[in-house]
Image: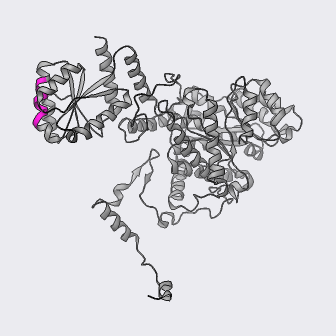
Amino acid sequence: MTLKDMVNESFRTYSLDDWTQKAEEALKGKAVNSLKTNTFENIELKPLYTKEDLENKKISQFPGQADFRRGFNSLGYLTEEWKIAQKIENGEEFQEKLRSSFDKGQTAIAFNANKIELNDIKTLAEKVYTKYPFSVETNDNQSQILSILSNLANRDKISGYIAADPFTLGAIQGHAPNSEIYDNWAEVIQSADRTMPNLRTILVNTSVYHNAGGNAVQDLAIALATAVHHIQELLNRGLKLETILSKMIFKFSIGANFFMEIAKLRAARLLWSKVTEAYGAKKEDRKMVITAETSSFTKTVYDPYVNLLRAGNEAFAAVLGGIQYLHVSPFNEPEGEPTTFSDRVARNTQLILKNEAHLEKVVDPAGGSWYIESLTNELAENAWALFLQIEEKDGIGNALKSGWLHAQIEEVLKQRNEAIFTRKQSIIGTNIYANLHDKPLKNAEKLITSSIPQLRLSELFEKLRISAENLEQSGYKPTVGLICLGDLKAHKARADFITGFLAPGGIHAQKSENIEKPEMAIQFIKESNLSHYVICGTDKQYEEAAFEIVRIIKEELTKVKVSLAGRPEKEMQEKLKQAGIDQFIHIRSDCFDILSSLLKEMEVTSND
């Protein structure tokens, strides 16, 4: 073949059906559709997305164009970088910590407004308020903080946000803000607008719902419903629409589902553009400003260094989704106040994304992705439908007061718990690959109860670990004996599975030697003197040896409970149950339920 022939050579074009056929060959006859999965948002994810998925769907061609799903700046972060807004924990060295953080890459004044001393605000503001924007969420003390800042020289240069959402406390405490609260708030907003025109003061906070277990559709719908409620209440008190919109900022927590979270932020801008357009807002006023934080719901007490990876994944999604402010939670946040080290690592996570991954130089990399664009559209459609449902309940206030909204979120939380209980969803170091040598952090036993409870997904498994460690401290080491049939090759897979299955509950596994005959198993039980055992071997060994072992146990050791690793054929299961097997532990078992029952029974045994 000549060079000319090579230049003119082209690859054969294959159709989607051709690729589907090849994929199904690799799947050994299973249909490609068997790879579809369902999310907690009730969205079906396909294994492949093509241009056909976006046919008849309108998408933005360029960033900066309405509907703003691709961001409201045509050059993305090249126009305006996202602000690194790591919250500085208050304390004796608060002033020094804040100053030091700016030297190390922080680009916003961020702190916990509920704990700060008002004198500290005045001191820090005098030093840096014209250099950096504020990134502060407030509750009851918003007016006090704004009053201090309004007395500063050059106060018109104050920017960023010092914002409140009256629904934040209401959602947690189970009530909606009343008219008097909105009366006072309207005055605060108007006063701040006169003295600090570049400062945003109206927050729409969805984190409380996210941290109760809510999904992305609920985050979006609640954000719209809350924002619309704020608009209506403030319009009724004489504020102009353009003033209200220019003062609003939206807060989202970013969860673990990477692509879903990117799509959530894009859908949020799309939906907000449509809502504000319906109000008759100008294009400039239809832009959604977003502050985000990595999720506290996804973090764990045990194996806390895995939280570094979780936070990095969530921060990456937030930046690709197009946020304006970002707080990355320190890996030991569930423990309480972070350390200097965990603060630095959290801040450096953002600096790596900015200065090493160069994400500030890429304009909406998700744009045009058939998968993400399709997911954005579907999220927006589902969120809009839920928003209309909330409005049919007479708005977010009544949806909260009636308990309807709480019930909707609780249903999603139930689904999430079922997924981790059965280990369909993994929490590394908690319900899978748990390290029994990990110790709980100091606040591991702290419980939070409220109308919209603020949770972490791993909490229920962590309570099991704490119960197990309390048992061990009392002198009873929670342990299950493994009766290992035959040689190592025969029992290793199931023995290892059971060892890993027990670890999330803080329960140790004690393996027997290779059991060649029933008498050896009985001897192991008598020597180890435990209350629970699991027989581990092959299905064939179960037929040959398990029945005899169980028969002897039930005759001679009546208090001992015996389970079996694996799930034999149904007929064999029935025979084994009749022989005395208490339960079968396999990959589809409810891990949480079994471990919880084991620990309760061991607590009873320890008191005998």
**Quarter occupied by the N terminus:** bottom left
Q: Is residue 455 visible?
A: yes
Q: What residue is at 67 percent from the left and 37 percent from the top?
A: 86
Viewer-proximal residue, 24 or 357? 357
Q: Is residue 555 above or below residue 107?
A: above
Viewer-proximal residue, 216 or 586? 586
Location of residue 565 in the rendering, given as x and y in whole percent from the top left corner: 23, 35
Location of residue 381 in the rendering, given as x and y in whole percent from the top left corner: 53, 52
Q: Is residue 161 visible?
A: no
* Image position of 295 (left or right of 505): right
Q: Is residue 547 magenta?
A: yes
Location of residue 188 in the rendering, given as x and y in whole percent from the top left corner: 78, 32
* Image position of 441 (left or right of 64): left
* Image position of 236 (left or right of 23): right
- Magenta span dominant secondary structure: helix
Q: Is residue 375 above or below residue 299?
A: below
Tally of numbered discs: 0
Q: Is residue 437 magenta?
A: no
* Image position of 261 (left or right of 286): left
**Residue 336 sits in quarter:** top right
Protein image colouring = one colour
**Residue 235 sits in quarter:** top right
Point out the stretch of residues depicted in magenta: 544-552
Location of residue 152 in the rendering, given as x and y in whole percent from the top left corner: 87, 33
Viewer-proximal residue, 320 or 277? 320
Q: What residue is at 16 percent from the left and 23 percent from the top?
A: 523
**Quarter occupied by the C terminus:** top left
